[in-house]
Image (spheres, grey):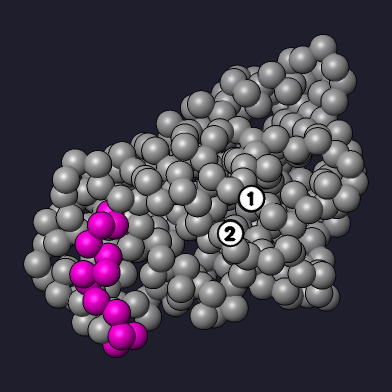
Amino acid sequence: MKSRLLALALCALLTPIAWAGQPAPAAPQAGGAQHPLLWKVSDADNAVYLLGAFHLLKPDDYPLPAEVDRAFDDSQSLLFEIDPAAMTAPETVASMQKYMGYDDGKRLSQVLPKATLDKLGILLSASGASVQAFEDKEPWAVNLGLVLSVAQALGFRPDLGLDRSLMARAVSAGKPATGLESIDDQMRAMDTTPYAEQAQSLEEFLADPQKAVRQLSDMHAWWRAGDAGKLDQEMREDMARKTPETYRLLDVERNRAWLPLLEKRLTGSRSDNTLVVVGALHLLGSDGLVAQFKAKGYKVERICDGCGASAGD
């Protein structure tokens, strides 16, 4: 069973909490070859590039593939999950903290099964912490913090995430960049996931933390390889099957809300192209943005120089 929070933190959810207090992106380093999860959606005069992001990366994930550079150069504006200006706004952290807590009077020890709570206590005590320090946090917030700790211990950094790198690049190039949703929209989606599914995801992590390490390495390798099929099968399908309400709220409903906003970029009177950068899982599967644009009859093509005949998948 895969960790849904691992998938969300790194491919589906922007997790602005990981950005709090982080430095500006470091200078790109020379890295190995990779294939982007990049599609071009076209109508008669406009194009929308859909780029699947990994939200925490390593220095050797740079420079970006040439296909991404071309899409950036061919776009007059960029769209991210969240407006870049909101990511560093002073009120952002306070807003996130609000959603991480309870508004129904409950406590962590009340919503977690005892076995899960005991495992969490053992893990936290190893680092000198205690469950009591997290009593006011919902399970998803505790789980997300653990996942991000693992990711950063392995060398993954939010300041090197694909979206943040392209946000900085847009500023340097003087290209306007906005968001598809607000911080409140994103946090509200996470906050409304059922306690039972939140607890299930946390239990998965606590049952075998080393599995999260292996899964992270696998996900990163699939993303670098542009392996849409593997990411879809191993991460998105697993999330949809095991925690269906979480999947609906965090993936399906958000995609549904974004689609008309993206379609306006195609049908507008101005002849402008847009580079859209969102978590990779938002592009995949029957609920993904790529499939939804295809269903609407738009021309959709995979942009991947070395992906071969399967690139259109």
- Name the foreground residue: 17 vs 301: 17
Secondary structure of the residue carrying tag 1 is loop
In reply to whether residue 130 is colored magenta, the answer given is yes
- Which residue sits at x=29%, y=79%? 129
Could you say which is closer to the camera, residue 117 or residue 100? 100
Which quadrant of the structure image shows residue 65?
bottom right
Measured as percent of width and height from the top left, residue 192 is found at 31, 39
Q: Quarter of the image containing the N terminus?
A: bottom left
Residue 223 in view in this figure: no
Question: Label 1 amino acid?
Answer: Thr
Q: Secondary structure at mark 2?
A: helix
* Part of the protein shown in magenta: 126-138
Pick the front one: 294 or 142: 142
Any mark on residue 19, and which? Answer: 2
Q: Quadrant of residue 127?
A: bottom left
| Tally of numbered discs | 2
Q: Is residue 313 left or right of residue 267?
A: left
Q: Which mark is residue 88?
A: 1
- Local packing at callout 2 (Cα closer than 10 Å; few below 14, some 14-19, many 20+) is some
- Does 13 appear in magenta? no
Q: Is residue 21 above or below residue 48?
A: below
Q: Taking 146 as reference, is 207 left or right?
A: left
Amino acid identity at mark 2: Trp
Asked if disc 1 and disc 2 are in contact, CB closer than 8 Å, the reply is: yes
Position of residue 300 in the picture relative to residue 87 (left or right): right
How packed mark 1 is, by other alpha carbons closer than 10 Å (few <14, some 14-19, many 20 or more), is: some
- Left or right for 100, reference 86: left
Q: CA distance from mark 1 to mark 2?
A: 8 Å
Q: For the point 37% across and 80% down, which residue is it?
A: 210
| Mark 1 or mark 2, earlier in chain | 2
Residue located 56% across and 33% down the image: 181
